[in-house]
Image (cartoon, helix red, strand yellow):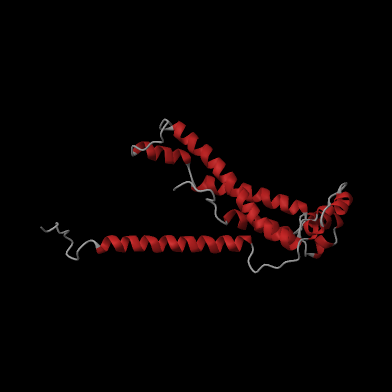
Amino acid sequence: MPLKVNAGGVIPVIFASSLLAFPQTIAEYPLVKNNAWLNEALRAIHHGEPLYFLLFTALIVFFSYFYVSIVFNPTEVADNMRRYGGFIPGIRPGRPTSDYLDAILTRLTLAGAVYLSILCLIPDLMMSGIHLQNLPLIGNWIDRHFPLFILEGLNLRFAFGGTSLLIVVGVAMDTINQIEAQLIMRHYDGNTPRAGRIRGRRR
């Protein structure tokens, strides 16, 4: 498995969205609505609130690392490289290779998680903004000094969110890669005669 910046794809975003949608679902029950403390706590993680964006970003980062830790094992990759005679220039085989791959993967995963967070938060910020005026202590000062389009958004409606665009682009790129692989295989098959024998060049 080659190292990728966004190895998790949209899976971290889906997991994070599902976890944050669960409190909003239970907030509709009468038992929760009648409880003032629970109602206030769930309102703080409602869509558009600062805590929602903070939790959403933290969950995307967490699930990005969680998914990569499941699908990629640096120790196993380092052992396979040593078994088949492969190596990384300047890095000793075995444990140093595993540590080197783990360090590279950690940096790549962080970059991918930040990329996913930005991609998913931009449409939300443009649609509903981030309600910083609801923060305690400094909310009144923010309400007076921050532009309205940051606090309330631009009131835009997108047909596709960040996750949808990521899925569409990922599927399109995968389709292009499969078409290229089929064309390359067909090109090599065309160089081989039907009889299976490759003819020498005639004088």
The answer to whether one can see residue 156 in this image is yes
Please say if 61 is above or below 130: above
Q: Position of residue 30 (x, y in %)?
A: 81, 65
Please say if 25 is above or below 79: below
Q: Position of residue 161 (x, y in %)?
A: 64, 63
In this image, 127 relative to 114: left or right?
right
Quarter where residue 82 is shown: top left
| Residue nearest the viewer, comparing 146 with 92 | 146
The quarter in which the C terminus is drawn is bottom left
| Residue nearest the viewer, comparing 38 with 84 | 84
- The residue under the point 88% across, 53% down is 144
The answer to whether one can see residue 26 in this image is no
Q: Position of residue 64 (x, y in %)?
A: 58, 49
In this image, 153 relative to 123: left or right?
right
| Residue nearest the viewer, comparing 140 with 35 | 140
In this image, 66 relative to 74: left or right?
right
Q: Position of residue 169 (x, y in %)?
A: 53, 61
